[in-house]
Image: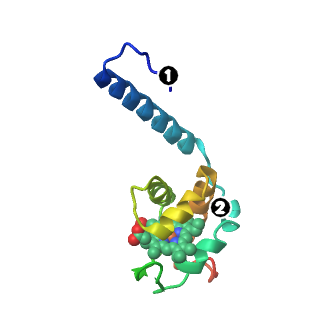
Amino acid sequence: MNLPVNLSPKKRVLTCLISLMASSLSNFVMAADLVGDANKGASKVSLCAGCHAIPGYRSSVPEIYTIPMIGGQSAAYLVSALQAYKKGERKHPTMRGIAGSLSDQDMVDIAAYYAGQSASSKPNYLK
Ligand code: HEC
């Protein structure tokens, strides 16, 4: 980024912050425009099923964690949780790595898929 040279250090920091805020705002708008496709999502969850589909399963990487159930959770919640791992606002190392490898489109597709699952839906190893 090229900042005007005549700005005081304080103003430079401000300009920098404002442009950072503007760029994260445009990322958000971009994500909000995406439409999730549950069928595409179904083809992207084989990795997730290794942990999330097993009731009561505990991950031992890197410590013992209880794995939350995500089937039936609202799509908006799932996307925001995945974004938070990707950005580092949520700290769990395994989920940070996994969310970091997902595009915004992957996230909305996966969220649409999981939001469509419920306790009464057909038994399915990806649930
Ligand atoms: C190695 C096991 C593992 C795999 C694989 C995995 N997760 Fe997770 N996931 C976890 C654990 C453990 C947590 C709880 C982390 C925490 O405490 O923040 C979690 C948390 C989450 C949450 C937050 C749930 C909540 O209630 O807040 C979401 C959403 C999620 N995972 C989605 C996914 C998706 C989508 C995939 C596949 C792309 C995936 N996970 C793959 C172990 C895994």
Q: Residue at x 54, y 79 (%)?
A: 51
Nearer to us in this view, 65 or 57: 65
- Whether pointer 1 and pointer 2 mark residues with C-beta atoms closer than 8 Å, the reply is no
Left or right: 7 in relation to 84: left
Q: Residue furthest left?
A: 10
Q: Residue at x 35, y 16 (%)?
A: 7
Nearer to us in this view, 30 or 88: 88
What is the number of the mark on residue 2? 1
Question: Residue flagged by tag 2: what amino acid is it?
Answer: Ala
Quadrant of the rendered structure where residue 45 is? bottom right
Q: Count of labels shown?
A: 2
What is the number of the mark on residue 49? none
Question: Residue flagged by tag 1: what amino acid is it?
Answer: Asn
Query: How dense is the environment of label 1, judged by Cα within 10 Å: few (below 14), some, or many (20 and up)?
Result: few
Q: Position of residue 69 (x, y in %)?
A: 47, 75
Q: Position of residue 37 (x, y in %)?
A: 66, 56
Quadrant of the rendered structure where residue 88 is? bottom left
Nearer to us in this view, 50 or 110: 50
Query: How dense is the environment of label 2, judged by Cα within 10 Å: few (below 14), some, or many (20 and up)?
Result: some
Q: Position of residue 21 (x, y in %)?
A: 41, 34
Labels 1 and 2: the sequence-earlier one: 1
Residue labelled with disc 2:
38
Q: Residue at x 48, y 79 (%)?
A: 61
